[in-house]
Amino acid sequence: MISEGRAAAIRDTLTLYLRRRVLVVLLLGFSSGLPLLLSFSTLSTWMREVGVDLTSIGLFALIGVPYTLKFAWAPVMDRLPLPPLTRWLGRRRGWMVATQLALMVTLAGLGTTDPLASPLLMALFGVLVAFFSASQDIVVDAYRIESLEETEQGAGAAAYVLGYRVGILAAGAGALLLADNLGWFQAYLAMAALMLVGLLTILLSPEPEGPAPVPPPRGSRMQKTAQWVREAVVAPFAEFLTRPWALLILLFILLYKLGDAFLGAMTNPFYIDVGFTKTEIAEVTKVFGLLALLAGLVVGGVMVRRLGLMWALLICGVLQAASNLVFALQATVGSEVWMLVITIGVENATGGMGTAAFIAYLSRLTNVAFTATQYALLSSFMAFGRTVLSSPSGWAAEQLGWVQFFFASTAIAVPGLILLLVLMRLFPPLPAADKPATETPA
């Protein structure tokens, strides 16, 4: 029997997650997650299917460069209006509607290209999708933080991750199933239409109050421009970079999930080479994989709370690196679906654990006075490993073969773990229960 106190706690939790503001964040998370795979992972499946070589596919990871540079234009979206949308909808909603409409157009355009006949046009549309997707992420993060009450922030973060992963599922499994039955153009057109989820959500939601308006700069036009740059651009970065060992922390952010990114860039081409159909890939890697990932997110969150942030980062990092070795076994076994279930279960569960701990780490590093810009900076460093540093993965797979490639992807994760140990020596972790609420860790 469930005690009355526990039943009340469950009811309170359900009520919290069913609040309108939290549900809005859930749907905006879907809108943020949808474009991510469509500009590379799903795209790489299309390219491999028509015979594009692995080196070229690997280089297409560079399409994601906007995710690594979004901190450069985050201050503009954070401070400047976008007439006339800002006047009609407000600052956050105006920018969000603009990015979502642009995503609908560019996703449909991406579906009209041909990997063999027009690779440069495909790359151009891919970059545009990544740019508008990264821009949407900036404003969604700001909207999420500003629209939720303090007691709703935890539930809002969980709802956002859930929505994000469902969006990834739609762009992965959904797009592959549609492509298998209708063709790639129809698949991308359907994905463009799914952006209406986020568009309708934001049109039916209120503009958040946000921080108090910043007084307009005084003086000449040049003085006003200089003051705006200092407050909107320089101050968030300067505050972070003056912290002890800031550059070492940024290097750790760059490297922590690099092994995962190096592997992830080649998983879909690997599945095609081994002999799996797109439907098998969709059913196992996306549907079952999402469940395994969500389980990993829950376990990772519990580990952060029970073990403390830094120890959770270390344990989850070791497990997510070791899980890459399961792919070597998959390459040996071949196109056996039962083995694919094991491979994806292990990979996604450990990856989810690492993601939960890592997002908690990035959030703790962010100064609430500069939330949007600093979070964009930190997530840009994380994305740099996923895009630029993982771009040679196709060349490595061709040179090494699949089994050796998976061993190499495991080895690539080791420097990040060593750097984490160094940070733990510089900033010794306290037990989770002893951490002060205002502490900002390494």
Image (cartoon, rainbow, N blue to C red):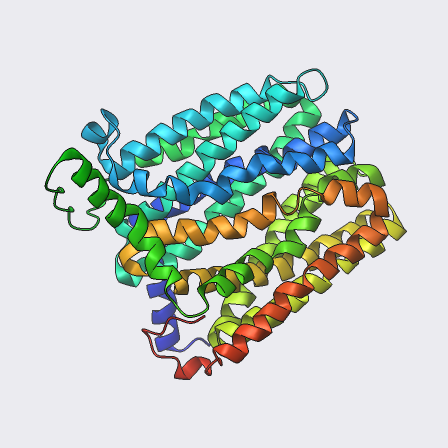
| Image location of residue 39, percent across then percent down | 58, 33
- Look at 80% across and 47% down and name the residue there: 337
Horizontal side, residue 163 vs residue 393: left or right: left
Residue 361 lies, in percent from the top left, at 46, 64
Position of residue 234 in the picture relative to residue 227 (left or right):
right
Q: Residue at x 28, y 32 (%)?
A: 94
Between 222 and 94, the residue placed more toward the observer is 222
Residue at coordinates 34% horizontally, 50% vertically from top-left? 372
Q: Position of residue 26 (x, y in %)?
A: 41, 47
- The quarter holding residue 122 reads top right
Depth order, front residue of 340/401: 401
In what quadrant of the picture does the C terminus appear?
Answer: bottom left
Picture residue at 25% right of the left edge, 27% below the top = 85
> In this view of the protein, which residue sits in the foreground, 16 or 297?
297
Q: Is residue 162 visible?
A: no
**Residue 400 shows in this picture:** yes
- Residue 330 in the image, given as x and y percentages of width and height: 83, 52
